[in-house]
Amino acid sequence: MVSSMPTLSGAQLTTTLAQIKARHGGAPWHERVIITDEFTLTVICQPARHPNDRHYHIRDECWFVAEGEISCTFEGGTVVHARAGDFVFAPKHTFHLIQPAGDGPSIRVAVSVTGEPHRHERPPAASA
């Protein structure tokens, strides 16, 4: 279930991860919990061996691993392995690929700039 409306707003100020998980079946799923003019907070559940798409953003992004483990491969070859309780930072303009690690699903909380899409190709460099 993915709704275009955020879970939290002026009418509902709190929720729990358990409540969010109860609204969904098995992975994969995601839920936008907060959407403001400045940032979006999304809970993302991915099954084991189910990577997302390799992409970058023109704004910084970060994640908190709530359950399971993830492996993040960043442009340039840096690989970060993060477990439940870890934070990961993805600098702007840096391609990254996130994959669940281990045998079970992973759940992470992503914080990104509202309206910032996944970008799959860079525009050609401007000539001087």
Image (cartoon, grey):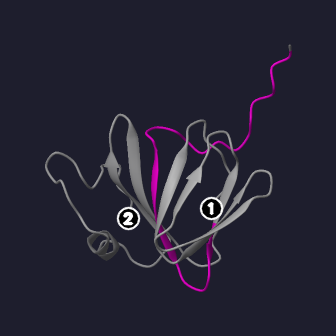
For the residues labelled 1 and 2, say whether their Cβ atoms are less than 8 Å apart: no
* The residue positioned farthest toward the front in the image shown: 86
Residue 26, above or below 66: below
- What residue is shown with label 2? 1
The part of the chain drawn in magenta is: 99-127
Report x, y in % for residue 27: 48, 75
Left or right of residue 20: residue 42: right
Left or right of residue 28: residue 37: left
Residue 102, image quadrant: bottom right
Report x, y in % for residue 96: 68, 54
Please give the name of the residue rendered at 55% of the width and 58% of the height, measured from the top-left corner.
Answer: 88
Quarter of the image where the C terminus is located = top right
Looking at the rendered structure, the secondary structure element under dot 2 is loop
Three-letter amino acid code of the residue under disc 2: Met
Of mark 1 and mark 2, the one earlier in the sequence is 2
Label drawn at residue 52: 1
Q: State the residue in front, 98 or 31.
A: 98
Residue 29, above or below 121: below
Q: Mark 2: give few (<14), some (14-19) or many (20+) Cα within 10 Å.
A: few
Please give the name of the residue rendered at 74% of the width and 36% of the height, measured from the top-left corner.
Answer: 122
* The residue positioned farthest toward the right in the image shown: 128
Three-letter amino acid code of the residue under disc 1: Asn
Left or right of residue 125: residue 46: left
Looking at the rendered structure, the secondary structure element under dot 1 is loop
Report x, y in % for residue 113: 46, 40
Q: State the residue in front, 77 or 96.
A: 77
* The residue positioned farthest toward the left in the image shown: 11
Quarter of the image where the N terminus is located = bottom left
Q: CA distance from mark 1 to mark 2?
A: 18 Å
Q: State the residue in front, 96 or 123.
A: 96
